[in-house]
Amino acid sequence: MHPGWPGLILLGYLIGIITGLFGIGGGFLLTPSLKIIFHVSYPVAIGSSLLQIFCTSLFSAYKHWQHKKLDTKMGALTAAGSLIGAEGGVRLLRFFTAQQPVALGGQSVLLADLIISLGFLMFLLPTAVFMYREACASRQRGTDEPQSELWNCIKNCQWPPLAAFEQSHILSLSIWMPILLSLSVGLLTGLLGIGGGFISFPLLVYCLGMPTKTAVGTSTLQVLAASGYGAFRYIQAGNVDFLLVLLMLLGSTLGVRTGVRLSRRINACDTRTYFSGLLVVAVLLIVYDLLKCFIR
């Protein structure tokens, strides 16, 4: 039995709640937690996170589909783009892992570790600030859903072929828009060991104009495809700890049920506010890990 098994089960439970509530894999929190708290190397933490995210997202996607909060047509398009991007991310990580360590604060740090930590910060912090400010603005207007100028620009790009997404109340949209946006999500999946939901969820809401509740379920489907492919590639490389994944899954199975129930009770505006707060927690965890290099 893994010496940290109680903590791993608890971590899995918390990630399960996040998956069910926000439609994300929780890899932006799971991967740094495995590295910082449980001292798992980044390659193994990434591979194990992806496999755990895949299994958790599979259950979460089914629960959201049951509650008719999943746009399968949109999910299929974004999943296709994510798969292509994930391969690029895996190759990038392999390249960084092969490089020599760098000096940071008088300590020798692996280049891959530094790139991954900075990559998390570069995406997490701006996304958290933007979503919090937008949610506050929506609350002041007395509306649940955001008014996105970016969505107005994207829907005017009528590059054929066009499609309607009835579940998301989108009458006409170029299919290239969700595919291109999901390429970036896939790249982050392969490089950072995340399902990509923390980027996918805001993209679906602000760029594609999906209702928040539907975006939660649809994001889960995209995370499922991207994390599944990423996990397969890391298993091939021998960078997955199956016992560690099993322990986390024991907790996440229960956590998903809790998260899905919560998602039905919390309004759309509060969902985005809580999501931004969760991103800040991940940012603080990564900053703490970086500061340790200077404190030693």
Image: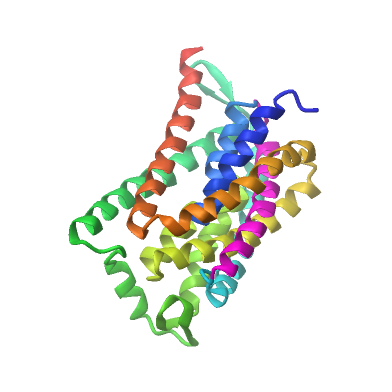
Q: Is residue 120 above or below residue 69?
A: above
Instruction: Identify the coloring.
Output: rainbow
286 horizontally vs 221: left or right:
left
Q: Is residue 274 above or below residue 269?
A: above
Q: Which residues are magenta?
A: 39-67
Residue 245 coordinates in the image, percent (x, y): 73, 41
Question: Does the magenta run of residues contain 45?
Answer: yes
Please tell me in which quadrant of the rendered image residue 145 appears.
bottom left
Q: Residue at x 53, y 33 (%)?
A: 114
Q: Residue at x 54, y 63 (%)?
A: 183
Residue 56 coordinates in the image, percent (x, y): 65, 52
Residue 20 coordinates in the image, percent (x, y): 55, 53
Residue 98 visible in rendering: no
Please tell me in which quadrant of the rendered image residue 239 appears.
top right
276 horizontally vs 73: left or right:
left
Residue 175 visible in rendering: yes
**Quadrant where the N terminus is found in the figure:** top right
238 horizontally vs 137: left or right:
right
Q: Main secondary structure of the magenta part?
A: helix
44 horizontally vs 180: left or right:
right
Q: Residue at x 43, y 42 (%)?
A: 278
